[in-house]
């Protein structure tokens, strides 16, 4: 998801976030349904003589809870790209310092083919003076193309090329 903000001092900010499929309450509900089904089968297995079924149910619930928690935390990450006449900066959630900082006149926006991804998947890369930074890696392919078009326009405007 790409959100664009403009401030009064002609500074533009793009906030990139992954799309969330579920809310926190829905994640908890999903876990409750999975845990209930797991324990129902474990209790039935225990009643039929499988003494290890509750242990495996416990291990399964811990694994599913940890996996859902990891997915929730990964979906809360964000990137902020800020542009004005003097700076093009990229910052990521959870970090104090900028991941990328350069003058917009020297910044190149490149679309590169990803090495490990299936064919047709593109990466959006900002590069300047030997430094490069991939942005929007968590976005869907069509959102990356939208980001590339938006960044190209904003960089041209910030560098007074338009």
Image: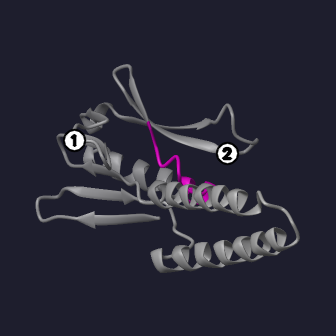
Query: Could you say which disc has been placed on residue 140 in the image?
Result: none
Q: Is residue 43 left or right of residue 112?
A: right
Question: Which residue sits at x=53%, y=51%?
Answer: 138
Viewer-proximal residue among 44 and 132:
44
Q: Position of residue 94 (x, y in %)?
A: 30, 47
Protein image colouring: one colour
Question: Which residue sits at x=65%, y=79%?
Answer: 33
Whether residue 162 is visible here, answered yes or no, is no
Q: Position of residue 130 (x, y in %)?
A: 38, 19
Figure check: 27 above or below 104: below
Viewer-proximal residue among 35 and 128:
35
Q: Is residue 129 left or right of residue 122?
A: left
Query: Could you say which disc has been placed on residue 121 in the image?
Result: 2
Q: Position of residue 3 (x, y in %)?
A: 37, 66
Q: If you read the primary sequence from the N terminus, does the residue marked by circle 2 or circle 1 appear first?
A: 1
Q: Label 2: how many residues lie within 10 Å, few (<14), some (14-19) or many (20+)?
A: some
Question: Which residue sits at x=48%, y=76%?
Answer: 23
Q: Position of residue 46 (x, y in %)?
A: 80, 68
Q: Is residue 140 magenta?
A: yes
Residue of label 1: 96
Callout 1: SS: loop
Q: Is residue 107 left or right of residue 83?
A: right
Q: Label 1: how many residues lie within 10 Å, few (<14), some (14-19) or many (20+)?
A: few
Figure check: 119 above or below 38: above
From the image, state whether disc 2 or disc 1 is nearer to you: 1
Question: Which residue sits at x=56%, y=80%?
Answer: 29
From this viewpoint, which residue is outermost toward the left? Answer: 9
Span highlighted in magenta in the image: 134-145
Q: Is residue 148 magenta?
A: no
């Amino acid at each position: 998801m790409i959100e664009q903000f403009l401030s009064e001092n002609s500074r533009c900010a793009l906030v990139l976030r992954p799309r969330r499929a579920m809310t926190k309450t829905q994640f908890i509900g999903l876990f409750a349904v999975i845990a209930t089904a797991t324990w129902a089968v474990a209790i039935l297995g225990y009643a039929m003589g499988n003494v290890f079924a509750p242990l495996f149910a416990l291990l399964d619930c811990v694994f599913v809870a940890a996996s859902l928690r990891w997915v929730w935390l990964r979906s809360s990450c964000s990137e902020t790209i800020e542009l004005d006449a003097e700076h093009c900066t990229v910052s990521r959630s959870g970090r104090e310092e900028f991941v990328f900082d350069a003058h917009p006149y020297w910044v190149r926006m490149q679309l590169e083919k990803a090495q490990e991804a299936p064919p047709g998947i593109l990466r959006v890369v900002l590069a300047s003076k030997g430094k490069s930074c991939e942005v929007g890696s968590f976005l869907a392919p069509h959102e990356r193309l939208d980001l590339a078009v938006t960044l190209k326009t904003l960089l041209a405007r910030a560098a007074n090329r338009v």
